[in-house]
Amino acid sequence: MDTLRIATRKSALALWQAEHVAERLRAAHPGLAVELVPMTTRGDRVLDRPLAAIGGKGLFLKELEVAMQEGRADLAVHSCKDVPMVLEDGFVLSAVLQRADAADAFVANDFRRLDELPPGARVGTSSLRRQAQLRARRPDLVLLDLRGNVNTRLARLDAGDYDAIILACAGLQRLGLGGRIASRLLSPDWLPAVAQGAIAIECRAGDARTIGLTGVLDDASTHRCVAAERAMNRRLHGNCSVPVAGHALEDGEGMQLWGLVGDAESGRLVRAQAQAGAGDPEALGVGVAERLLEDGAGAILAAAVARAGH
C-alpha cells in the first residue's frame, strides 16, 4: 500500500493538526496509508526562556526537516505562523489549508473583555506582537512571560498566576477549548500574527509525488492571503524577536492587507493598509511593508533586534 509519513511535533495541537491533514489526505486519496511520526523539537524542550532568545520559531521546524532529509518522513505539518519567512533550501510549502479563525483570544475567568481588566492586572503572553498591542491599549497592565503548550498556559491562568492570557482562537477551537475564549480581539484594531489560523504542509522541493498528493489540500485564497502577509514580514525581516502583525482578506474587489509594527516596551504602533487585486499578493505585502518603513517602523525594528541581541 502507498504510504505517506507526516513529521509532527508532539504537542496536542500539533498532533491534532497532523491528524487533520492525515484524514484529509486519506479522504482525497482512497487506498493511501498515512502515518504520523511524532517528534520533540528544541522549541518544545526549552521552556524557561523566550523563543526570541533561543533562536526563534524555526526551532519548531528543524528536527522535522531533518527527518524529511533523512527519509524518515515525507512531509511536515506546521502552524503556518511558525514557518520562517524564508524556508531552508530544498523545501517548499506544497499546500496551505483553508484558514480557521485568525483572531487572537482574550482568555480570562473573571473578565469578558480586555477593557474590563482593572489597573495593574497581570496578563500573560511571551509574544512581542501581543505585548506591543497590549501596551498601546492598556499601558497600566503588568505583562508577564508565558510559554508552554495551550493546556499548560490555561492551567497557569486557572492557578491564579495571571488575571488573563492571550492565545490564538484557532488553537483553542481545534482542541475543543473554544469555550475558554472570553472575547475575540478583532482586526483591524488588533492584528494577529502573520499567517495565524492557517495550517501549512512542507515537503522536499524535489519530491514530486508528495507535492502532488498534498497539493489537492491547498486553499488558493488562503495561500494568496498568507503569501501577502509573509511577503510583508519578509521585507521587514520579521521574526519572533520583532513585533510584526498582519492580516490579509480577499473580497470581490481583490485583497486588502493590514500591517503593524509595534514596540513592546513603549506601546508605540505603526500601522499601514493597502488594497490591490489578488493577482500579485507578494507585491501587496511588500508595498504595505514599505509604507510601514516610511512611517517609522525601521527604528522600532532596529531597536527590537538590538534588544534581542541579534
Image (cartoon, rainbow, N blue to C red):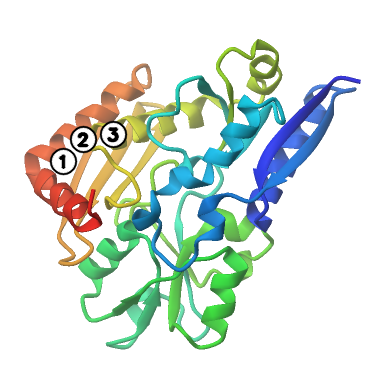
The circle drawn on residue 289 is 2
Q: Which mark is residue 232?
A: 3
Question: Residue 292, which numbered label?
Answer: 1
Q: Label 2 vs label 3: CA separation?
A: 5 Å
Which amino acid lies under the numbered mark 2 shown in the image of this protein?
Answer: Ala
Question: Which type of secondary structure does the marked residue at label 3 adopt?
Answer: helix
Whether the residues at callouts 1 and 3 have beta carbons within 8 Å, the answer is: yes
The answer to whether 152 is drawn above or below residue 306 in the figure is: below
The amino acid marked with disc number 3 is: Met
Q: Residue at x 33, y 21 (%)?
A: 277
Q: Could you tell me which secondary element the residue under label 1 belongs to? A: helix
- State the residue at coordinates (46%, 78%): 112
Position of residue 282 in the picture relative to residue 102 (left or right): left
Structural distance between the alpha carbons of marks 1 and 2: 5 Å
The answer to whether residue 196 of the structure is visible from this angle is no
Q: Quadrant of residue 152?
A: bottom right
Where does the image place residue 139, in percent across and percent down from the top left? 21, 75
Amino acid residing under circle 1: Leu
Residue 307 position within the rendered picture, expressed as x and y whole percent measured from the top left: 19, 58
The percent coordinates of residue 109 (x first, y second) are 53, 83
